[in-house]
Image: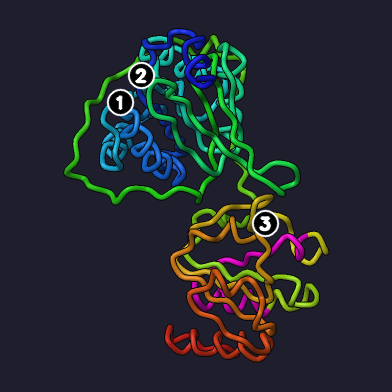
Amino acid sequence: MAAERDVEQMPDWSAYRGVLIVVEQRDGKAKAVSWQLLGEGRKLAAKLEVPLYALVMGSDVEHLAHEAAAYGADKVFLCDSPVLKTYRTRPYSRVVLKLIEEAKPEIVLFGATATGRDLAGAIGTHLPTGLTADTTELDVEPPPSRLLLASRPAFSEKMMATILCKQYRPQMATARAGVFEALPRDDSREAVIERLECELQEEEIAARVLDFIEETGHVNLEEAEVIVAGGRGLGGPEPFAMLKELADALGGKVGASRAAVDAGWIKHEHQVGQTGTTVRPKLYFAIGISGAVQHTVGMSHSDVVVAINRDPEAPIFQFAHYGIVGDLFQIVPALTEEARKRRGVTVG
């Protein structure tokens, strides 16, 4: 009865329907998190029995509108303008705000990237609604409440908090990359494409993007297909060089547990887990990693997990598809040598 009274007291938001995914792109290439959110958005839209929308913004990005259709969007809003060639908060937020005003989606989702967080935060300051940041789980309550259940780690990652926006629309959230799964791309799938105008002129925008300076040596774990991660069991920073040799032999990247990062053995950008990066590689090596929940939630969506640990009772083996119990200082070099043989790589 209490739940029924809560529903009765909610404002009438019946004009708001649909799930909108804001597609993030740079230089005409979409971020993987955008397609992952379309995959999750498809599930939410099905439960609510509403369309799944995508918004594509940029310059010369019409091809991304067709990609959005291939990844599941029912309708794609396309705003293609030279003003939107590079991301700037004001013109991008203006486009999104106008679309929300006209299309009235009940849910709006962004990737929890630097750009997505900036854009979502800017939009949140202009709308009478809330914004849940860095979500790792999404669901909806069925009608009549139609509430978005946006869950994220809380209290130093010791528990999950589910955040609701009961009194306002749209319900907005940013979501981590690598958490959700994109639908298989189907280029035969079609969607209605509606063009939007960018009303701002270049001279009305104070900010100018002069150049992009690429960070040398930056590690992009979110899009890595192979990750070789090390933990406290390595005993120090030096063995990470051994892990890099294996990663290089497999065409992958080096990851790490929070314990290894906190110990100062490797930079934070390599950290996998709740307070690091959530990943979805095809192959994940967990080497000398015990398997604490803070780490496993960040790699549990890997296609294949190989765990190497001296302790046969280590919790990581519960998540592994293949487990090797033994001395990692013998096992890892042997794997590296075999990987090099199969790729025809000679060293020395």
Which image quarter: residue 53? Answer: top left
Is mark 1 in CB contact (under 8 Å) with mark 3? no
At a point 43% along the width and 83% down the height, the residue shown is 343
Magenta-tinted stretch: 242-261
Left or right of 345, for residue 72: left
Q: Secondary structure at mark 2?
A: loop
Amino acid marked by disc 3: Gln
Amino acid marked by disc 2: Arg
- Across and down, in percent, residue 257 comes to 69, 63
Residue 110's place in the image compared with 129, above or below, is below
Say whether disc 1 or disc 3 marks the residue closer to the N-terminus. 1
Q: Residue 163 magenta-drawn?
A: no
Residue 313's place in the image compared with 217, above or below, is below
Residue bearing mark 3: 294
Q: Secondary structure at mark 3?
A: helix
Q: Residue 256 magenta-drawn?
A: yes
Left or right of 77, for residue 113: right
- For residue 17, the mark is 2
At a point 56% along the width and 57% down the height, the residue shown is 221
Q: Main secondary structure of the magenta part?
A: helix
- Across and down, in percent, residue 295 comes to 65, 60
Residue bearing mark 1: 50
